């Protein structure tokens, strides 16, 4: 009986010592958190292993993440994964649909992004672009005739339009001189003509014309002249000659005729009317995109996600190098308190650490058993 009690006692003592030493060793990984000093003497094994070598641990964790976890190859495979691209496409399509259906105007959306008075800034940029483009073109073409500056297609179109312009001028002339206003104009011109001719010519006109109104005689002749085919050909020929003269002008002469500032302002006004920035910035985005919203969501969005994923996959190594992920992980770990590191490790390995403690107790008990048996044999 005494032998059994001795062996049991040795087993219990061994188990307690084994479990306690393992538990103490686990706790010494983290504790104490800070070094303990007795006067100028630092107590050995303080602070714990992890607090003492936290900087080295942070560096190793950063290296482990970039070398084994977030490698360029693993991220590249993720970007090219069909399921990932499908999920990203769905996400982009959903966000685009929400954006394109908003009642906010582009000006309001840009204000949210911190860009105030976007329309005015866009107009300034557009005017600056026109000025720079104008100056660039004038430097190149200022000394050249217009026929070398203007494209042959435009010159040909103007040539074709000259008879039309001639017909329009004559048509307006007929309308004017056929009107009461035109007749009154003819009458004034005739009266002025007669008044300025004194003497024999005036008396002869009075004798032959009598009380007949000159405007009644002149008006039909003017209208008949304007309707004549020969008149149309004459006007067209005159316009053609003048147009040919203009084409021989150097571009610099156009600038002199219209004045550079006025010419540039005229171009700016034309460009702004074409672009219509006020309509773009003040119209709700839902109305601006209504005609091509479906194409953006169903065609452009999937293609954009595919192209972006392909582009990122080819440059992921460069991006990761620029991001310095290892350095980011190291800095982040260094900012953790030791208490947080302990909590993180224990939350992951709690059950395993308990098993280590129990294993220490088991081994201690087995050692106690052998020690008890050995002591009995020796005695």
Image (cartoon, rainbow, N blue to C red):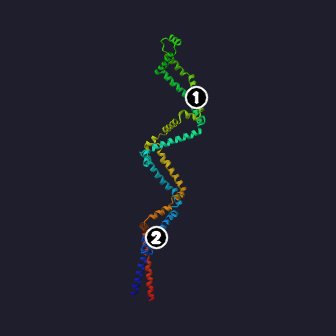
Which quarter of the rendering shows the N terminus?
Answer: bottom left
Q: Nearer the viewer, residue 211 or 157?
A: 211
Q: Nearer the viewer, residue 31 or 246?
A: 246
Q: Which mark is residue 159?
A: none
User: How many discs mark residues in the rendered view?
Assistant: 2
Q: Residue at x 56, y 30 (%)?
A: 161
Depicted 69 relative to depicted 281: above or below: below
Q: Residue at x 49, y 43 (%)?
A: 125
SS type, badge 1: helix
Label 1 to label 2: alpha-carbon separation = 94 Å
Would you name the residue on which mark 1 appears?
Answer: 242
Which quarter of the rendering shows the C terminus?
Answer: bottom left
Q: Which mark is residue 52?
A: 2
Depicted 194 relative to depicted 297: above or below: above
The 10 Å Cα crowd at callout 2, few under 14, some 14 to 19, many 20 or more, is many
Tag 1 and tag 2, C-beta contact below 8 Å? no
């Amino acid at each position: 009986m005494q032998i059994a009690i001795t062996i049991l006692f040795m087993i219990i003592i061994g188990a307690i010592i084994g479990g306690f030493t393992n538990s103490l060793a686990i706790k010494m990984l983290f504790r104490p958190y800070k070094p303990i000093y007795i006067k100028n003497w630092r107590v050995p094994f303080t602070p714990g292993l992890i607090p003492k070598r936290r900087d080295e641990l942070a560096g190793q964790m950063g290296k482990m993440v970039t070398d084994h976890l977030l490698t360029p190859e693993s991220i590249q495979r993720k970007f090219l994964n069909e399921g990932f691209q499908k999920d990203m496409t769905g996400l982009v399509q959903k966000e685009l649909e929400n954006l394109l259906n908003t009642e906010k105007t582009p000006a309001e959306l840009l204000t949210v992004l911190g860009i105030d008075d976007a329309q005015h800034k866009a107009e300034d940029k557009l005017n600056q672009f026109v000025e720079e483009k104008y100056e660039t073109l004038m430097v190149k073409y200022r000394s050249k005739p217009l026929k070398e500056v203007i494209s042959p297609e435009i010159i040909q179109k103007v040539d074709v339009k000259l008879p039309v312009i001639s017909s329009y001028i004559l048509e307006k002339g007929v309308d004017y001189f056929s009107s009461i206003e035109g007749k009154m104009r003819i009458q004034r011109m005739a009266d002025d003509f007669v008044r300025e001719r004194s003497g024999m010519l005036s008396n002869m006109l009075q004798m032959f014309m009598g009380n007949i109104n000159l405007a009644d005689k002149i008006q039909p002749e003017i209208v008949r002249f304007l309707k004549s085919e020969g008149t149309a050909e004459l006007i067209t020929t005159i316009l053609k000659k003048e147009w040919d003269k203009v084409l021989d002008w150097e571009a610099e002469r156009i600038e002199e005729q219209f004045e550079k500032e006025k010419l540039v302002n005229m171009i700016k006004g034309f460009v702004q009317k074409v672009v219509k920035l006020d309509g773009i910035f003040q119209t709700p985005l839902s109305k601006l995109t209504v005609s091509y919203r479906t194409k953006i969501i169903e065609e452009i969005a999937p293609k954009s996600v595919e192209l972006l994923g392909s582009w990122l996959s080819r440059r992921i190594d460069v991006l990761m190098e620029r991001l310095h992920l290892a350095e980011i992980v190291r800095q982040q770990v260094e900012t953790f308190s030791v208490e947080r590191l302990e909590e993180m490790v224990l939350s992951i390995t709690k059950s395993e650490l308990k098993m280590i403690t129990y294993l220490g107790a088991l081994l201690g008990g087995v050692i106690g058993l052998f020690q008890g048996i050995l002591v009995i044999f020796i005695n």
